[in-house]
Amino acid sequence: MPEQHEPDGAVSAAGMGGAMDLAAAEAATLERTPGGPGGAGPRGRPRSLWSDAWRDLRRNPVFLGSALVILFLVLISLWPSLITSGNPLTCDLAKAQEGSQPGHPFGFDGQGCDVYTRTVYGARASVTVGVCATLGVAVLGSVLGGLAGFFGGLGDAVLSRLTDVFFAIPVVLGGLVLLSVVTSNTVWPVVGFMVLLGWPQISRIARGAVITARQNDYVQAARALGASPARILLRHIAPNAVAPVIVVATIALGTYIALEATLSYLGVGLKPPSVSWGIDISAASPYIRNAPHALLWPSGALAITVLAFIMLGDAVRDALDPRLR
């Protein structure tokens, strides 16, 4: 018998129907598969850099350990009465340089002040200076560097030469000169000095990140569609250029805490009656042989705090760097 041939339209319809059924089946399978295709998120949605970074950070013991230490420091900075009921300015000369006693686990310093209470209250000054200086440096440096990298031209050239001038100023020497004439006992002169000399580093990081992001195809497409420079900078470039700024600022936070202690040790940072680890280290240095505990505890607290912030910054850098994936 002669072969029966279906019309071409029927064959095409059947082929299309089979392809559509297969695609629907694959889509349903992807929705039921955790993680989705190619590292996608739930229900097949692609993951972003930030979601991938957060997933990696939650699994990183270094990040978790440093974050717990920093959280504890923030809590005792806001509410030191949670772990101590003493007054850091209450001293008894009759107990000067004495060691550990019941209710005073760290002993007493050269003025008869409780070392434990002063160590707890010293976290407030260090965390305040570090956080405020980092925020100021990040905002000022990101704005100046981002605008210079985006627009280029004369403004970019002037900013580059200006950052060279600031990089030539030694930080400790600049602090000795600028802060020696300040008589305020608050943290704000120290914060202002750090912002003044710290913004060039963030500025260069932000400038380089913006220049790199500006050359991407999605930025060129947005410009071709008529997007304004402000929209391109805020909606397309800034979200993709902020990661290196966050990494550098997180690591620099520990550096600013150490710098505050250094300046306070030299007598130009925070000044008595302010309570600071740098002030206590400076006061305990002359009698380190007779009462080493007065120097040991604030120095240890400072070292642990700086190390925690540096480790946190390293973990954030590893999570946000796509080259390490």
Image (cartoon, grey):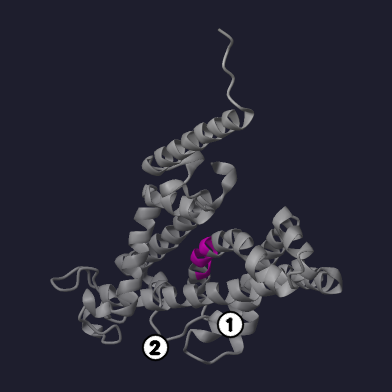
Say which residue label 1 marks. Answer: 192
> Along the horizontal axis of the image, is 34 left or right of 176?
left
Query: Label 1 is placed on what type of residue?
Result: Gly
Q: Secondary structure at mark 2?
A: loop
Closest to the camera, between mark 1 and mark 2, is 1
Question: Which residue: 76% across, 67% down?
Answer: 150
In this figure, which residue is indicated by the disc labeled 2? 273
- Nearest the viewer among 295 and 137 is 137
Residue 67 image position (x, y, % from top left):
37, 60
Which circle marks residue 148 in the picture?
Answer: none
Q: Which residue is located at x 76 percent, y 70 percent? A: 148
- Tell me which amino acid carries mark 2: Pro
Is the magenta region chiefly helix, strand or loop? Answer: helix
Vertical placement of 21 versus 49: above or below?
above
Q: How many marks?
A: 2
The part of the chain drawn in magenta is: 250-256
- Mark 1 touches mark 2? (CB < 8 Å): no
The single residue placed furthest to the bottom in the displayed view is 183
